[in-house]
Image: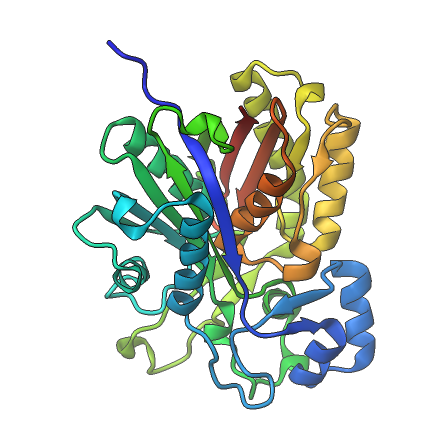
Amino acid sequence: MPSPPEITVLSAATELPGAAVDNAALAKLLGMPQQWADWVDTFVGTRTRHLAVDPASGISIASLADLGTEAARRALEQAGTTPADIGLVVMATAMPDTLIPTTVNVIADRLGIDGVPTYQLQSGCSGAFQALELAAHLLRGGVAGTALVIGGDRVTKHLDLGTDFAALPPAELVSVVMFGDGVGAAVLDARPGTERTGGVRVHHAFTRLTGAGRDPGHVLEWYGMADLAGDRPAFSREDYKQIEASVPAMTAAIVNELVEASGWGPAEFDYLMPPQLSGRMTERIVRELTEAGLSEAHEISCVRETGNVGNATPFFQLERLLRTMLPGERALGVSVESSKWIKAGLTLEKS
């Protein structure tokens, strides 16, 4: 029986809407005092983010499909592929433009992709890893030779600029501070020889639910017309204290599992793509992992500039990684989703 094909990441590209919004501009937009912007700088550590609404009017300037189409188009160009080469499309998002038609199919249509399997996964931060893992499994199973994988979120879809933000409890306000809008895409290939054409081999990938019996750390509501009568919970709520206590330990456990599965020692990894919850949280996680043995791994992070872009995050990291990774080098990526505590990770190697 022949061995399953190697899965190669040929390219990764991303798209952000509008200009960067720093903390001072965000404070002004939300009607918060400038001291609040200083607090965000110091204690959250996210300097800028991009918003898919015009700050002056609150009018949308880009949909998730708009951003996803551009990211995917550039990923295809960088990979030297065309829409006709794509035999599978997988997308992960927590905030699609519409429940139906699914955003993955809108993007595929705009790109001219048709007659192939398409999947849209509903998940938070770990969704991008789920999409990459699913695409890799399907490619190994012979469903297609080349796959387009997309991940992204548009938090400002639910940002009401008429809200009295100063009156919000921290559990609701933190989402406004931490998150930004963005989409990423990657081209994966299972055809023989592509692992030698400049791509990066997917060595191991996994996602796993670990939240049995645990309260969610992050809840994102979705309302239909029947829900509009009566009181509704806030759209987004985070138990940041629980997240702060749980994510570093979960990250360490994921790293240990990836090290064991790969057969490589911690010192053999050249790059680390850590979780991107916030600048300050990422800084803490990287410091602890460095002390635990990943001292040789160069950090690949984006959260201080982009904010937490949810399912787009790993694609921003992959985009940066592919620019710098040299033959023989290895990378490790980790994501933790706090909604129901999902672990996700992958290891990569440059041929």
Q: Position of residue 186 (x, y in %)?
A: 44, 46
Q: Position of residue 109 (x, y in %)?
A: 25, 62
Q: Position of residue 235 (x, y in %)?
A: 47, 70
Residue 268 visible? The answer is yes
Check the image and name the residue furthest to the left: 115
* Residue 144 left/right relative to 132: left
Q: Quadrant of residue 189?
A: top left
Residue 215 visible? The answer is no
Q: Quadrant of residue 19?
A: bottom right
Q: Nearer the viewer, residue 96 or 226?
A: 96
Q: Is residue 254 above or below residue 188?
A: above
Q: Position of residue 299 (x, y in %)?
A: 71, 39
Q: Nearer the viewer, residue 40 or 86?
A: 86
Q: Who's the residue at 57% across and 30% down the image?
A: 254
Q: Is residue 191 above or below residue 23?
A: above
Q: Who's the residue at 55% across and 65% down the image?
A: 16
Q: Nearer the viewer, residue 35 or 121?
A: 121
Task: Tell me the quarter of the image containing the N terminus.
Answer: top left
Question: How did the renderer colour the structure?
Answer: rainbow
Q: Who's the residue at 59% across and 65% down the image?
A: 175
